[in-house]
Amino acid sequence: MNETARLISDDPIWLILIKVVATFAFLVVMTLLTIWAERRVIGRMQQRPGPNRAGPFGMLQSLADGLKLAFKEDIRPVMADKWIYILAPVISATPALVAFSVIPIGGEVTIFGEPTALQLVELPVSLLVVLACAAVGVYGIVLAGWSSGSPYPLLGALRSAAQVISYEIAMGLSFIAVILYSGTLSTSGIVAAQQNGWFFALLPFSFLVYAIAMVGETNRAPFDLPEAESELVGGFHTEYSSLKFALFFLAEYINMVTVSALATTLFLGGWHAPWPLYLIGDGVLNTGWWPVLWFLGKTLFFLFVFVWLRGTLPRLRYDQFMNLGWKILVPLSLVWICAVTAIRGVRNADLLGSQQFLFIGGGIVVLLLIVAFLVPDRKPPEEEQEEPRAPLSGGGYPVPPLDLKVPETPRETRVSATTGTRSRLPEAGQEPTSSTKEAPDGND
């Protein structure tokens, strides 16, 4: 049992309740502020003001939108399965709240005279809890589409579920290298292992895979396929309104905060102060309530990246998105895990020194780059020019005859408004003559 687990195990019930309420309030407030900040930042990128009426700098606009959703009419489709239709938003929002409970926000502090750690739950398998919560959240998506009683939400739910599951696999593979280097599945243990160096520099490929996977996992741009104009209406939540739709909206933004906090925990040292701040006063900025500031700063950085991507990148097609997950991220992650395992085995056995290891590793990288540049690109097959096919009577596809001529336009006729008779207009180059009168149609 590590120090964090020992402190949390001694928490009285009143302190646990305070932590639960504080965690829930933190996630709700972060959701409101993230929505406001997203609209303001994208407005800045597009040279428009964004929300600036409700409250100072428009900060109460998200709260006003939430109240508006609460007072909207709650409509339930006639063909919907009532209880599952109501339960699906709850299943989506609850795992997002539970996953944040294993995130360490800070170190040891004192709350009302009781020493504790700024973490709700400490488990030896905390990372598995996060993956389990992500897996349970998929059930909310599928059940929401199925219970709506309409084919469009059902098809949108299947596509969204396939998207989340695909990138959940890549996310889980990015954890393995971190687990190998930290030697634990505990989030507080992973933070303690980064005291002398953050994992984003030591494991850059794992960090890159996780950064891509967390965007795909949360259905955010450029992977926000349920919101695409060419997709199936609004996806799995098409038939939802009022507070049920607000729960789906809340789940999306809480998931954003959770995956950002997890990225901070796994790759940016968690609540540890960045260099060179941790050198001040023999690490005094890593004690007390200071770590909360560093943790929030790193989490807000990832949330800004979410907004930045939405305002910058175009939306991917569904096939491009799935190919990126299954054909690129997953295979490369497996190769990376094998490489990390081999490197750890060589380093632990002291078979190579640091200089020899760097020399051999650099040589392998240079060799791979040379091979990548020397391999010629595969040329696309040349398109063969097909000869015109015969008409359908002689076999093949129906095509117009090759000697087709457009018939001449008939000469224009003029109808008299008084007598109702028709007269031909003179052809080009002819002198106007008395027109030949034709009998009206009724006198033929």
Image (cartoon, rainbow, N blue to C red):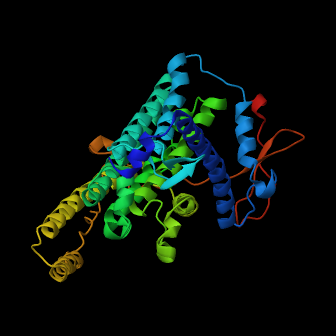
Task: Give coordinates of residue 188: x percent, y percent.
Answer: 39, 53
Query: Can you say whether 205 is above or below 106 in the image?
Result: below
Q: Nearer the viewer, residue 19 or 281?
A: 281
Query: Can you say whether 63 is above or below 80 in the image?
Result: below
Drawn side of residue 388 relative to residue 17, left or right: left
Q: Nearer the viewer, residue 194 or 54?
A: 194
Residue 17 in view (yes/no): yes
Task: Give coordinates of residue 384: x percent, y percent.
Answer: 26, 62
Drawn side of residue 316 relative to residue 79, left or right: left
For the point 74% across and 53% down, the residue is: 59
Q: Nearer the viewer, residue 75 or 270?
A: 270
For the point 15% across and 66% down, the residue is: 348
Give the residue at the far front of this rendering.
Answer: 113
Residue 403 in view (yes/no): no
For the point 54% across and 59% down, the residue is: 288
For the point 28% across and 63% down, the residue is: 383
Q: Nearer the viewer, residue 263 or 209?
A: 263
